[in-house]
Image (cartoon, rainbow, N blue to C red):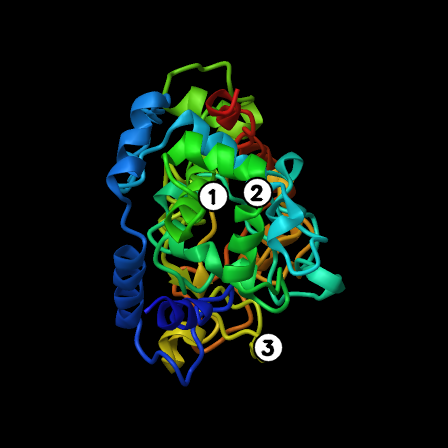
């Protein structure tokens, strides 16, 4: 059973599901069900939270954070997940960690066009921010993974990333006396698929960004939090002419939809959502990214092909290249130099990378 489960999970990589294995997105729900069956916590794991400090992450102007009942957030689990996140022990050659592609100083991106994995191998995609992952209904830019827990398997086993069988990564962690102690303290249990995936996903859930100047102005009424330029930029952002908010809706600045923004006429190396659904109409569609901390996460787009935010605005103003699947929201608009400066000022007001710290100290 475990072997069959692992083979299924291996199919869930950073780039979606292979054509020959899973034809429909509904299969992802089945995968999630199998992961649940294989990783149900025992009573000791549930009782362990009694000797740990539970952490409640409630943000007044955000939707309630969805947290699985069998995976409560606790202080020790966050700390353990953070340690694993920064430890190269999970990779084949122990030369990279999760943090190699997700640097806190860059809002958990890496500043590269596309990420670099073990032995210098290049992936196909730009590293996305990890802030506010807890609210994501599916993971990866093509939506090819259903939960934070099951996505843990993807980067570990993906050839261009860590390239390590999950069983090997787990065995390495289990062989460490320090990790065994930490897992016992956090879960009341040894290292196993449930505890390892829960530790990492718990840390990732704690990465929240919500207290930017924009939030102080828009949700808490601090009129001094935004400059006049940024306030004008907010008006542009929400205007009917630019319609940015139609996809980058508040407060999370994304509606989690999949859109083809007319970046290219041909998506030869990465078809986006179509890699998962095998539907031609999904070719070139990628999940709408959050704009929080956007000034820190350059370069932009799924392949990092756009270097600056100014160029991003130029792309949308030009109306895209006219791909057959291009979103109806991408149809071009006129913008003056001053308006562009205002819009950039507003985007800068979405910067806030310190909020998550309170859950780790």
Which residue is drawn at the image coordinates 71% and 66% (left, top)?
Answer: 121
Residue that badge 2 annotates: 85
Tag in front: 3 or 1: 1
Q: Position of residue 334 (x, y in %)?
A: 54, 52
Pointers 3 and 2 in contact (CB under 8 A)? no
Which percent across, then down, holds residue 90?
Answer: 60, 52
Question: Looking at this view, is 192 or 255 the one in front?
Answer: 192
Q: Earlier in the sequence, mark 3 or mark 2?
A: 2
The residue located at (53%, 19%) in the rendering is 361
Residue holding disc 3: 269
Q: Which SS class for mark 2?
A: helix
For marks 3 and 2, give the one nearer the viewer: 2
CA gap, disc 3 and disc 2: 29 Å
Neighbours of disc 1 within 10 Å: few (<14), some (14-19), many (20+): many
For this orientation, the residue located farthest to the right is 120
Q: Position of residue 199 (x, y in %)?
A: 44, 41
Q: What is the distance, in whole Å, between disc 2 and disc 1 at their CAs?
A: 7 Å
Residue under pointer 1: 200
């Amino acid at each position: 059973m475990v072997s069959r489960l692992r083979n299924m999970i291996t199919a869930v990589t950073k780039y979606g599901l292979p054509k020959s294995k899973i034809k429909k997105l509904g299969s992802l729900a089945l995968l999630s069900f199998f992961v649940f069956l294989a990783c149900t916590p025992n009573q000791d794991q549930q009782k362990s939270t009694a000797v740990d400090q539970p952490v409640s992450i409630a943000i007044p102007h955000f939707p309630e954070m969805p947290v699985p009942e069998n995976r409560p957030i606790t202080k020790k689990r966050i700390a353990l997940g953070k340690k694993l996140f920064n430890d190269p022990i999970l990779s084949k050659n122990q030369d990279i960690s999760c943090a190699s592609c997700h640097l806190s100083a860059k809002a958990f991106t890496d500043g590269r066009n596309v990420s670099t994995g073990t032995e210098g191998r290049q992936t196909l995609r730009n590293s996305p921010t990890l802030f506010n992952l807890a609210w994501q209904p599916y993971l990866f830019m093509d939506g090819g993974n259903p939960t934070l827990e099951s996505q843990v398997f993807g980067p570990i086993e993906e050839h261009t990333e860590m390239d390590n069988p999950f069983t090997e990564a787990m065995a390495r962690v289990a062989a460490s006396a320090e990790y065994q102690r930490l897992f016992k303290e956090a879960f009341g249990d040894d290292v196993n698929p449930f505890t390892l995936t829960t530790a990492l996903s718990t840390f990732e859930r704690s990465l929240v960004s919500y207290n930017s100047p924009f939030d102080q102005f828009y949700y808490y009424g601090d009129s001094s939090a935004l400059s006049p330029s940024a306030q004008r930029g907010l008006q542009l952002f929400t205007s009917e002419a630019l319609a940015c908010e139609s996809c980058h809706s508040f407060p999370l600045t994304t509606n989690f939809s999949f859109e083809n923004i007319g970046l290219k006429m041909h998506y030869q190396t990465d078809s986006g959502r179509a890699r998962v659904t095998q539907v031609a109409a999904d070719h070139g569609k990628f999940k709408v990214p959050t704009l929080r901390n956007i000034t820190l996460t350059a370069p932009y787009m799924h392949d990092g092909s756009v270097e600056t935010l100014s160029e991003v605005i130029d792309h949308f103003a030009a109306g895209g290249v006219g791909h057959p699947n291009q979103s109806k929201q991408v149809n071009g608009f006129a913008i003056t130099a001053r308006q562009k400066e205002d819009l950039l000022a507003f985007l800068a007001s979405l910067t806030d990378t310190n909020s998550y710290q309170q859950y780790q100290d």
